[in-house]
């Protein structure tokens, strides 16, 4: 896989877990990485995103990893408030829109770009925690990936997506894992073809492929990195 020397990347959601692993992997490949977490830039705020991107300068690689369930748990659909719905959709889908819109003009001018959106298995199936907005927003990321690939491909920009399976990557997923108990944990692992949970590095390896020259004829795709969970 070619080196990333000279490339500049923005990776969102780098406070821990998957985002941190992606940032570390790209940096190890020689990419200059500008990490973003909620304490540095509110990626749901388009003005904040635009200011950050302008300050960074020309960007070659964008990885939209920020998102999550925003501390929410399942409630019946008729109990979902407007605010709770918007919070999750904004964190996962609107943030992706804001960041792509901000970097696209310079990528077009330079005739090269790599964009990777981190969705979820919930976007291809259902949310294990039953959070309606999360499954919907992650499915929206997949659709947005296809649309942006169609729009931007003629300018040398590829746009792809990764749908991770269950990865113990942050306090939220750790709490979710613990809530299953021994029986539930065993059942989850049994539903994964390779019989193990994912690691953040597994997702980072997929990103490394999508941003490399090896994937220059791959765009608009969603890759499930889930140990074969999607087979069941």
Image: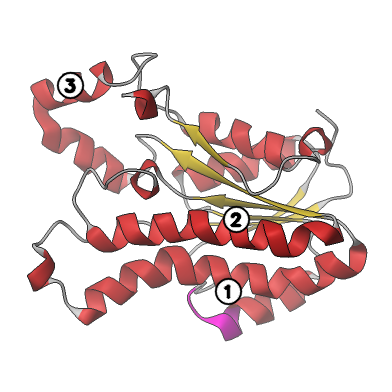
Q: Position of residue 108 (x, y in %)?
A: 84, 67
Point out the image quarter for the N terminus. top right
Q: Residue at x 72, y 65 (%)?
A: 151
Q: Is residue 199 above or below residue 152?
A: above
Question: Residue 168, relative to residue 35: is it above or below?
Answer: above
Between residues 111 and 204, which one lies in front from this camera angle?
111
> Which is nearer the N-term, disc 1 or disc 2?
1
Crowding at dot 2, Cα within 10 Å, few <14 / some 14-19 / many 20+, comes out as some
Q: Which residues are magenta?
A: 44-48
Cα separation between marks 2 and 3: 33 Å
Compared to residue 182, the image places residue 126 above or below, namely below
Give the number of the disc on residue 98: 1
Residue, x 79% and y 74% (percent of image)?
105
The quadrant holding residue 58 is bottom right
Residue identified by numbered label 3: 187
Residue 192 is one of the magenta-drawn residues? no
Structural crowding at the residue carrying mark 3, measured as other residues with C-alpha within 10 Å and reported as few (<14), some (14–19) or many (≥20): few
SS state under label 3 = helix
Give the mark, 3 or 1, whose residue is nearer the N terminus: 1
Q: Answer whether labels 3 and 1 touch (C-beta < 8 Å).
A: no
Q: Give the dominant element type of the magenta stretch: helix, strand or loop.
A: helix
Q: Was residue 46 drawn as part of the magenta stretch in this picture?
A: yes
Q: Which quadrant of the figure has residue 182?
A: top left
Q: Foreground: 87 or 175?
A: 87
In terms of secondary structure, where does tag 1 sit? helix
Residue placed at 15% from the left, 72% from the top? 80
Q: Which residue is mark 2?
A: 146
Which quadrant: the C terminus? Answer: top left
If you read the primary sequence from the N terminus, does the residue marked by circle 2 or circle 3 appear first?
A: 2
Which of pointers 2 and 3 indicates the residue nearer the eye?
Answer: 2
Answer yes or no: do the residues labelled 1 and 2 have beta carbons within 8 Å? Answer: no
């Amino acid at each position: 896989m070619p080196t990333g020397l000279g490339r500049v990347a923005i990776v969102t959601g780098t406070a821990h877990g998957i985002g941190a692993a992606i940032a570390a992997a790209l940096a190890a490949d020689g990419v200059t990485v500008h990490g973003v977490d909620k304490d540095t830039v509110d990626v749901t705020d388009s003005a904040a995103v635009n200011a950050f991107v302008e300050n960074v300068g020309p960007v070659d690689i964008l990885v939209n990893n920020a998102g999550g369930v925003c501390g929410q748990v399942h409630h019946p659909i008729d109990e979902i408030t407007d605010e709770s719905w918007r919070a999750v959709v904004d964190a996962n889908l609107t943030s992706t829109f804001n960041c792509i819109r901000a970097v696209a003009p310079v990528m077009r001018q330079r005739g090269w770009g790599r964009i990777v959106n981190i969705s979820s298995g919930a976007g291809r199936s259902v949310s294990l925690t039953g959070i309606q907005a999360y499954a919907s927003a992650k499915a929206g990321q997949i659709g947005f990936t296809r649309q942006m690939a169609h729009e931007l491909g003629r300018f040398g920009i590829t746009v792809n997506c990764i749908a991770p399976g269950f990865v113990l990557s942050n306090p939220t997923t750790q709490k979710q894992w613990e809530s299953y108990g021994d029986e539930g944990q065993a059942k989850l692992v049994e539903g994964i073809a390779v019989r193990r949970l994912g690691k953040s590095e597994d997702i980072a390896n997929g990103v490394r492929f999508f941003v490399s020259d090896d994937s220059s004829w791959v765009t608009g795709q969603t890759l499930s990195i889930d140990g074969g969970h999607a087979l069941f």
